[in-house]
Amino acid sequence: MRIPLLSAFSGVAGAGLRVLSFTLCSLSLLPSVSGADDDKEELRDLFFGAAMYYAHQENYFDAIVALDNELAQYHRLDEPALDPFSNHLGQAEFSVGDLELSYRMHREAGRAIEAVLKGNVSQEVRNEAAYRLAKIHYHKQQPLNALHALEMIEGRVPLRVRADEQFLRARVFMELGRLEEAVELLKDLKGEESLEGFVEFNLGIAQLKSGEEARGVLELTALGKRHSGDPADQALYDKTNLLLGSHLMEAGELQLARPYFDRVNLEGPFSNRALLGAGWVEARAGRFDRALVPWRILQNRKGTNESVQEVMLAVPYAYGKLDVHSTAAIHYGRALDAFGREIDTLTASINSIRQGKFLEALRRKEATQVQNWVVALRNLPEAPETHYLLDLMASNDYQEFLRNYRDLNDLYERNKEWLKSLAAFEDIISARRAYYEPLLPQLDEQFRTLDARIKLRMEQRDQFSSRIEQMLVSRRPEYLATAEEQEARLQLLQLHKQIARNPKGFTEQSRSRVERLQGILDLRLSTEYHQRLTEAYKHLQALNAEIEKLQTVYRSYVRSRQAATHSYTGYNKDIQRSRAQIRSAQQRLEMLMARQGSMLEALAVEELERRRSQLESYQIKARFALADSYDRANELQEQREDQRKIEQHREAQPETLPEQNPPELEAPESENGLQEQSLEAQPETLPESNPAELKVPESENGPLEQGGQPQADQPEILPENKSAERQVSEAEGDKA
């Protein structure tokens, strides 16, 4: 008989304390539970089915508690073979280890699996257990121990874990640097549907690390060209393309790197890094105009992303290289404003985390009821900006810390509910005691009366049964006489005795009549003996049925009496012990939650401070770049203004001929005045060219222009306004 109340009390504290033995390793799957579906075994025990239901719902804690209680109760039964749970005993014991592994109770799971390895089980079960143990060591980042566990596998591995075992062995080889062996194993796994994509990715990585770069690039290229409607598969393909593009860009293969960045889905989780990488490929090739195409797309995305913040400086840098300094200055200014806002947000987020708001948000149940709950945390009151923590929260280590903290918090909340349940159990027990104790004395009185009647009927039945058994051995017709016949027989016996004492007192006729009556009675009993014996046997069977009914009532009353008594007696000690254990567990949970919470806060604050320092560095670079862009833009503007003034001056002063020749071109006076008069009489004309002896060397006075006017008479080119430029630079410096 199952006793749920006792089972609950016995499992509360024990299961609660076992959960505290967590190790910070990654989550694994539940293959043995799924294996139960493959075997399609018929469910014989509903309690085992309920535990498996919790397991398939990924509610591993409830599944572990249910199986632990069932196993403990099964081993306490007087006749466990009669319990239907015995049909699932082996599967239950093996499933407990898998469930503990899924709940990251690696120590308990390791002990359970090692017990299976040491037990008397088949080689296939032993091989599967060795594979589970190797997986535990691998997730605990112990590849050497994982390899030792895999070496324990001998013979045939169960089909449902054969591919997983080979894939695990290949990853262990990669961790240990045995890349050639890993490559051979992964080649054999190509085509496995359950591992599609992952095998090719690891194979390409192993080939790149082992020196087979060409083959690795080809393998990863083939994987990156795939497309899928499944977001997880598409993310794997995008990661492959991003990896190859970055690898080729670092190797200087710019022309080959760009197509890999272009293959990344623009809506995927790696799109920002792909757009940034595509722009840097073009920038390194000197094509800054083409680099602006992906960078401008990236610039309009969420400003908290690290790639977006980097591209806020990359875009004006490209404009500066294209000598569009005014546009570069505008973008630098926008970047400064954005960086300032984000630095303020990060500072507020760090203060919020240090005040405990982050852990408080993690503990709230409504935050986990949406799919993208990490981003939803930022919408809670006074919660930090979680967009900066997305990359951190996606890491394996932080995920382990986070899951452990949430599991500890879940267990803490469960213990609080269990403490309330213990108080409710005490109220139920008090109500039962108040109800049953006044009724039981009256019921006991009626039970004693019924018990006396049952005993009387059983004695009569036993006497009747013994007589029938005697008649089966020797004929006893008198036992089958009716009541009237028994009375007549007794009267005749009395008459015989009287006749024997006083024969003379009876006439011959009376004696003959008595003999005749005796003969008639004996004849009737003799002739009807078999029929009456059969009827007597039937009556005995009917009597047995009635007595069985009375015994059923008797046993029912006994059970009800015991159940009524047990429903309120014997629980006080269990409740007190369970309450003490739960309170002790609560203290340990508070200590562990404080440690895990401080670790989560420290990692989050460290990440936010890193991002803030990065933004402050970007801010300093943007300020200097902004001032430089202003200087270059002003210098270019002044050059253009000076050129415009020169052109205007040239247009305003057309070329004119001189009225007189220079003194050095005048003819010397002669002694006779005829020559002077003839010169005065002739009209004034300019010579086409000066005599050779009168030409001034170019090295002394410079070349002459048309009309003999020296080049020095041209309008001067205005010098650059260095003082104005200096004033602008100083003003910009003050502004920065």
Image (cartoon, rainbow, N blue to C red):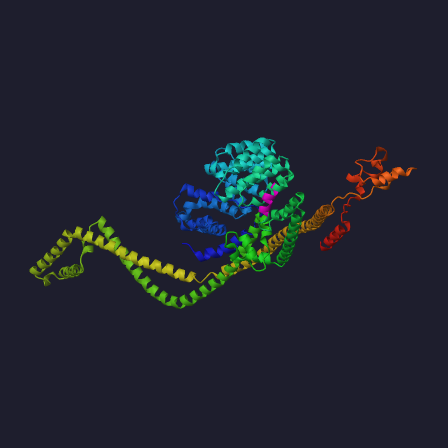
The image quadrant where one finds the C terminus is bottom right
Report x, y in % for residue 373. 53, 53
Frontmost residue, 347 versus 650: 650
Residue 427 is situated, as x and y percent measured from the top left of the image, at: 46, 65
Q: Is residue 703 left or right of residue 371?
A: right
Task: Residue 706: give x, y in percent of width and height.
Answer: 77, 39
Per the picture, the main secondary structure of the magenta-coloured stretch is: helix
Residue situated in front as seen by the camera: 100 or 346: 346
Q: Is residue 16 above or below residue 700?
A: below
| Residue 573 appears in the picture as rendered | no
**Viewer-proximal residue, 204 or 577?**
204
Residue 433 visible (yes or no): yes
Which residue is at the far right? 671
From which residue to which does the magenta span run? 290-298
Relative to 501, is 274 above or below?
above
Considering every residue shown, the one lying at the far bottom of the view is: 438
The answer to whether 1 appears left or right of 220 in the picture is: left
Residue 294 inside the magenta-drawn segment: yes
Q: Residue at x 40, y 62 (%)?
A: 564
Quadrant where the N terminus sits is bottom left
Is 288 above or below relative to 218? below
Question: Along the line of sight, which residue is nearer the eye, 61 or 183?
Answer: 183
Judge whether 183 appears above or below 514 on screen: above
Coordinates of residue 625 in the picture (x, y in percent): 69, 48
